Image (tube, rainbow, N blue to C red):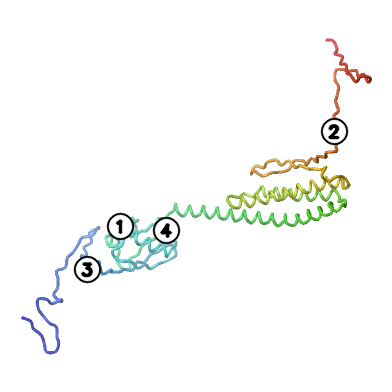
């Protein structure tokens, strides 16, 4: 039998939702006795807010109460920029594993968790920063050399124009300009570079070497301005630097019209016959 009031009061009966249910308790690790949540509460998606301290930074992260520390790390990744594998989470002074549940270790709403970056990860990032800084320094060093070589290249072109125009230039101009280019080549050799920076350095080295070769050829042509240009060829032999680049040995002009006479020195008191050109060597008796 159901009873009701005329003023719309609460109904009472066997299906009354206000009947108190018996509270079930569960024992958590550490001896904490808490009210047991039923499946309905879990499915309802109860959310909790966690205060996370990361050095001088503080974050408030909202996650489902039924989450693991691994889930918390994935949320923190977007907030801190640290990948989950780079994070270490401590709760109540103890580091927690990814598969541990927040509610099982006592993490509740407004609980505090400490976040630290993994030392190995921090060291790897530091090494990467050093490599990146080293590469940046190499780029800047190569750029400075390139700027100086650009200035010298204009002088090389001007000197080449003078010689090809049939005018004679002072030998000192070739010597000074070659020396300045060689200094830049040594500067390039002193630059420690890896990867793309090393490629840029190699390109600049070859550029400097080409200017030195041009000066050597122009110098040989300047010595014989009215001769056949095709008969003069200068070859610069490049010795290898420790880094794999080259430094020039003395440039040797090779002129096809030049004849070389060998001087022979005679030993053991030789006698020469001018008529037949024969040489008799008289050996002293022992």
Give the distance between the C-alpha atoms of the residues marked 2 and 3, in whole angstroms: 107 Å
Q: Residue at x 85, y 33 (%)?
A: 260
Q: Give the labeled residue for mark 3.
A: 40
Disc 1 target residue? 100
Q: Closer to the N terminus: mark 2 or mark 4?
A: 4
Q: Disc 4 marks which residue?
A: 83
Q: How far across and down, in percent of the image, does residue 74 sit? A: 38, 61
Mark nearest the camera among 1 and 4 is 4
Q: Earlier in the sequence, mark 1 or mark 3?
A: 3
Mark 2 and mark 1: Cα distance apart in space: 90 Å
Residue lying farthest to the top in this orientation: 286
| Element at label 3 | helix
Circles 2 and 3, Cβ within 8 Å, touching? The answer is: no
In this view, the residue in front, 84 or 149, is 149
- The nearer-to-camera label among 1 and 3 is 3
Determine crowd level at label 4: few under 14, some 14-19, many 20+ residues with C-alpha closer than 10 A.
some
Q: Nearer the viewer, mark 2 or mark 4?
A: 2
For marks 2 and 3 on the same chain, the one whose residue lies earlier in the sequence: 3
Instruction: Say which residue label 2 marks.
Output: 260
Mark 2, other Cα within 10 Å: few <14 / some 14–19 / many ≥20: few
């Amino acid at each position: 039998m159901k009873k009701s009031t005329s003023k719309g009061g609460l109904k009472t009966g066997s299906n009354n939702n206000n009947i108190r249910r018996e509270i079930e308790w569960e024992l958590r690790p550490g001896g904490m006795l808490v009210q047991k949540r039923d499946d309905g509460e879990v499915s309802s998606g109860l959310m909790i807010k966690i205060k996370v301290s990361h050095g001088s930074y503080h974050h408030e992260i909202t996650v489902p109460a039924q989450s693991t520390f691994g889930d918390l790390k994935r949320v923190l990744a977007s907030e801190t920029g640290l990948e989950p594998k780079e994070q270490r989470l401590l709760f109540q002074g103890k580091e927690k594993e990814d598969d541990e549940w927040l509610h099982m270790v006592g993490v509740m709403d407004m609980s505090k968790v400490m976040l630290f970056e993994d030392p190995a990860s921090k060291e790897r990032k530091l090494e990467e920063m050093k490599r990146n800084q080293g590469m940046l320094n190499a780029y800047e060093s190569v750029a400075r050399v390139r700027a100086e070589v650009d200035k010298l290249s204009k002088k090389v072109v001007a000197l080449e124009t003078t010689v090809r125009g049939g005018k004679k230039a002072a030998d000192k101009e070739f010597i000074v300009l070659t020396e300045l280019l060689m200094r830049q080549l040594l500067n390039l050799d002193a630059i420690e570079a890896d990867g793309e920076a090393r490629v840029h350095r190699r390109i600049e080295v070859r550029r400097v070497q080409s200017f030195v070769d041009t000066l050597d050829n122009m110098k040989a042509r300047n010595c014989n301005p009215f001769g056949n240009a095709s008969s003069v060829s200068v070859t610069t032999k490049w010795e290898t630097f420790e880094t794999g680049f080259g430094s020039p040995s003395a440039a040797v002009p090779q002129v096809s019209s030049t004849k070389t006479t060998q001087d022979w020195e005679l030993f053991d008191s030789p006698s020469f016959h001018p008529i037949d050109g024969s040489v008799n060597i008289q050996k002293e008796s022992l």
